[in-house]
Amino acid sequence: MRIDDFRNQPKALDAEAPVAPGADTPSSDPAYVAKATKASVEFERFFVSHMLRTMRASTRAMADEDSVFNNRVNQDMQDMADDILAGNMAGQRAFGIADAILRQLAPDAKSAGAAKPTKT
């Protein structure tokens, strides 16, 4: 069989074929939307936490030897505070990363703002 034979054959319906809007897709399932929302917010938290950690590391690299930024006890507390701050910022979707991911994972969701998770 040659490649031209494949081009001339009609396409068979398969699982990868596009689905008509409004059909029962996974993105319209409330459980899927809730999981996608949680995952997207967690990714935003990870992203913000990594950004803060990188910024803090550059501050420590530029600090003097006797600076409070080079004290190990202060570093641990600052890391914990940065992690909490990242969680709060992600919960408020401050950067919009979670919303962008959610629009791709669940485009049929009514509103990205309506599916915001509550604080735990």
Image (cartoon, rainbow, N blue to C red):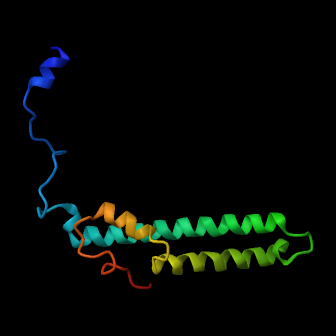
**Residue furthest to the top:** 1
Residue at (80, 77) in percent of width and height? 73
The residue nearer to you, when weighing 113 against 116, is 113
Residue at (60, 64) in percent of width and height? 50
Q: Position of residue 18 (x, y in %)?
A: 16, 49
Q: Position of residue 1 (x, y in %)?
A: 15, 14
**How many numbered marks does the figure carry?**
0
Q: Indicate whether 8 appears above or below 16.
A: above
Left or right of residue 114: residue 13:
left
Q: Quadrant of residue 77?
A: bottom right
Q: Position of residue 81 (x, y in %)?
A: 65, 80
Q: Position of residue 84 (x, y in %)?
A: 59, 79
Left or right of residue 107: residue 57:
right
Residue at (66, 67) in percent of width and height? 53
* Quadrant placement of the C terminus: bottom left
**Residue furthest to the right:** 66
Q: Quadrant of residue 32?
A: bottom left
